[in-house]
Amino acid sequence: MPLTTQDLALPALRARYAAGGTPTALCRELLPALAASHGVFISRPCDEEVLERCRFLEAQPAEQRGPLWGVPFAVKDNIDVAGQPTTASCRAFEYVPSQHARAVQPLLDAGGIFVGKTNLDQFACGLVGTRTPYGIPANVFDDRFTPGGSSCGSAVAVADGLCTFALGTDTAGSGRVPAGNNGIVGIKPSVGRFSTTGVVPACYLLDCVSVFALSVEDGAEVARLMENSDIADATFRQPNLANLEKRYSPGAAFRFALPNPQFLDGSFKGPGGEPVRQEMAAAMAQAVERLAALGGQQVSDFDFAPFAETAVLLYGAAFVAERYAGIRQFLEACPGSKPPQPPALASLHGDERLLKVIRRIISQTERFNAPDVFQGLQELSVLKAKMRAELAKVDILVVPTSAYNYTAEEEDPAYEAVTFSKNANLGRWTNFVNLGDMCGVSVFSGLLRPEAAAEVANGVNGSHDAAAEAEQQRRQQHLTATGNPTPVLPFGITLLAAAWTDEYVAGLAAAYQQTTGLKAGPLGHGVEPYRTPAAAK
């Protein structure tokens, strides 16, 4: 029997080892699945290297064994692992680091077994998981749907039972959307909680390393090992001590809010239209009931408007220029081109080293100048004050992890390279979080049957939009032609709060997870994964 996600959860692994199992035996079971995976890993250590690590751990006296002894984990390929190539999903960018990223080192020190570098949207630009030259990792529930990005490989590796946890990054939602799309947990820490030294920048001042796990408790335990207390580290931030000490007490009352209806469901224009909006609303209503059962009191006068306005800034204002700045040396060293003279920027439009959609995103930098940067910072300062005032009303803000489920076919690279519309939709509930200095946990919450909902409504999507209806018809034709017109997909929520309340959020998220009766991945949701028949591809 192949290993399952339940076999790889931390409690199960510890029970296995306590009963006499060994890391070598575990990895011998795991290695064939790692080798057979498609699009999940960009590179892996050779099997013998993994087994040598197992033998090293087995030689340790029991009293020297760390809390992650014998635990397999993966690392997103924009995070350095010494001796293993870092590509950020761009072949021309590849280099081999001599040191581990600071977030990786404590995991190895704790006894973890590194099993591979995972796929991602190139330079972590995307929430779809399809913007990569290394193949697309399959959504574990239904391979026709996007896995979510940019940390697509890390999420799929965990959800598909290839490792116990994986590191991702999260600047605009990359540690949350893939978790929601694959029915696992995504820990998005406060910016600065973990060091990002040794991480290829997406937006240096907003980046954080994230954790994908099979349960909130597993993810929170890993996160504690990674905390950065080195004041000499360039990415260190002084924590807010009051927030840092806040803890969730089971049964204690707490206040929570949802986005206003006009943001949550009134503007929904995704695949499936009105029937899916109704199903999403029912899933959120169920989440509210569960939170109330835990002691939550819903706050009705919460204004989500400043959060929505902040989300637009990340790609619609000068903040996008930080994506150019993070890899500027690489961009301005394009073979055959002359380095730009200050204050000019390298033109990316003909740079074939980058995928077209990534060129278009980063080249948005050309639209802005230095005064625009300061204007953006001023606008953000005003919005952050408004967000702080709203967050003071609650302990938790609750949002869908993602309100859209797109097929890989719908993610047309040529179309998206011009509009970015689907990716922007996926960022509706994520893009404001780091700009707003917040932390969060994405946790699985239920199932969606979007096309079944549309069938109940006799195909009427309620949009009164001819283009949207035509797109929905194309989608339904594709799902029918590929053998399953009624997919079943996971639904997740994200619990968000002010920075440095990470432990509080994790405690409440763990309690919420228990109320769902679900476990990670399709198996934990009671769903048979759908794989498109070869004849229908």
Image (tube, grey):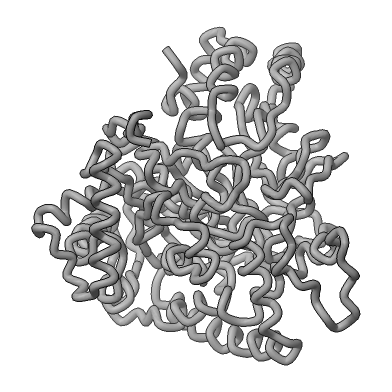
Expressed as whole percent of the image width and height from the top left, the position of residue 436 reads 55, 74
> Within the image, what quadrant is residue 288 found in?
bottom left
Quadrant, the N terminus:
top left
Expressed as whole percent of the image width and height from the top left, the position of residue 265 reads 27, 71
Question: 358 above or below 222?
Answer: below
Expressed as whole percent of the image width and height from the top left, the position of residue 472 reads 26, 60
Expressed as whole percent of the image width and height from the top left, the position of residue 294 reads 29, 54
Q: Nearer the viewer, residue 495 or 485?
A: 485
Q: Report whether 70 appears left or right of 464.
A: right
Q: Report whether 344 appears left or right of 531.
A: right
Name the residue rendered at 25%, 50% in the picture: 477
The answer to whether residue 80 is visible is yes
Question: 470 above or below 409?
Answer: below
Quadrant, the C terminus:
top left
Q: How many marks?
A: 0
Question: 492 above or below 285?
Answer: above
The answer to whether residue 247 is visible is no
> Within the image, what quadrant is residue 464 found in?
bottom left
Q: Report whether 346 appears left or right of 438.
A: right
> Within the image, what quadrant is residue 59 found in?
top right
Question: 451 above or below 83?
Answer: below
Name the residue rendered at 57%, 15% in the picture: 26
Name the residue rendered at 73%, 92% in the picture: 371
Q: Nearer the viewer, residue 179 or 537?
A: 537
Question: Can you name the residue that lies furthest to the top here?
Answer: 20
Q: Report whether 92 appears left or right of 530.
A: right
Name the residue rendered at 33%, 62% in the picture: 253
